[in-house]
Every structure is written in structure tokens, then in C-alpha cells.
């Protein structure tokens, strides 16, 4: 394994945690803006229909993936600028 990958591993773990927290906040704000009260329904929540459960899941997944990609890309670019080595 390359030294740059090993050195970047702790940074990647921290960025992963940050992106998860940030994505959760963004999703909650988007869910509210769409006019929904409270938290998004769980898949096993029988009080809500398929449409609402699947809409929430797809939206949450898309937001998580987008935020994670943006944070990971930003971290990789910053690491390359600081060290001159691409971390991947």
C-alpha cells in the first residue's frame, strides 16, 4: 500500500464522519422545505405509504452521495495542494 494512502486514511475517516453529519443536516432542511412535518419515515413505518417512504429514501441517498463526493473531492484536492501527492 502506498505511503500516501496510509497517511491519508485518518483524514479520510474524519471527512467521512463530517460528510455524514453534513448530509443529515442538508436532508432534514430539504425535507422540511418540501413541506413535510417532522422526520422522514422509516422503511418499516406503517403510517406512511410506499410513495413517501421511497421518496424519502431516494432523496436521502442522493443527498448523502452528493455531499460525500464533494467532501471527499475537497479533501483530496486539499491534500494534494499541501503535500504535492495525490492521496488515491
Image: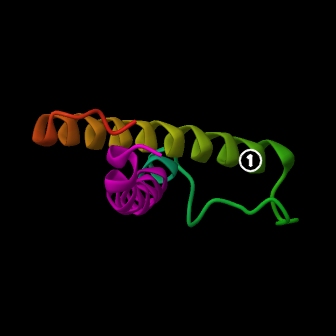
Answer above or below: position of 33 versus 86. below
Q: How many marks?
A: 1
Which quarter of the image is occupied by the C terminus? top left
Counting from the top left corner in percent of width and height, residue 52 is at: 74, 47
Is residue 22 on the magenta stretch?
yes
At 32% across and 57% down in the image, what residue appears?
Answer: 11
Relative placement, left or right, of 85 versus 87 is: left
Determine which residue is flagged by label 1: 52
Counting from the top left corner in percent of width and height, residue 30 is at: 46, 46
Counting from the top left corner in percent of width and height, residue 83 is at: 15, 41
Which of the 4 quarters of the picture holds residue 14?
A: bottom left
Badge 1: how crowded within 10 Å, few (<14), some, or many (20+)?
some
Q: How is the image coloured?
A: rainbow
Q: Residue furthest left?
A: 82
* Residue numbers of the magenta segment: 1-28
At 29% across and 33% down in the image, what residue appears?
Answer: 86
Relative placement, left or right, of 51 versus 36 is: right
Which of the 4 quarters of the picture holds residue 2?
A: top left
Counting from the top left corner in percent of width and height, residue 28 is at: 47, 57
Is residue 10 on the magenta stretch?
yes
The secondary structure making up most of the magenta span is: helix
Answer above or below: position of 87 versus 45. above
Residue toward you, 45 or 7: 7
Amino acid at each position: 500500500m502506498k505511503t500516501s494512502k496510509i497517511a491519508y486514511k485518518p483524514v479520510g475517516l474524519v471527512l467521512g464522519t463530517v460528510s455524514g453529519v453534513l448530509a443529515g443536516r442538508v436532508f432534514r432542511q430539504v425535507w422540511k422545505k418540501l413541506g413535510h412535518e417532522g422526520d422522514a419515515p422509516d422503511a418499516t413505518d406503517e403510517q406512511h405509504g410506499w410513495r413517501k417512504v421511497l421518496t424519502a429514501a431516494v432523496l436521502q441517498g442522493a443527498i448523502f452521495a452528493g455531499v460525500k463526493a464533494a467532501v471527499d473531492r475537497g479533501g483530496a484536492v486539499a491534500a494534494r495542494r499541501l503535500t504535492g501527492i495525490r492521496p488515491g
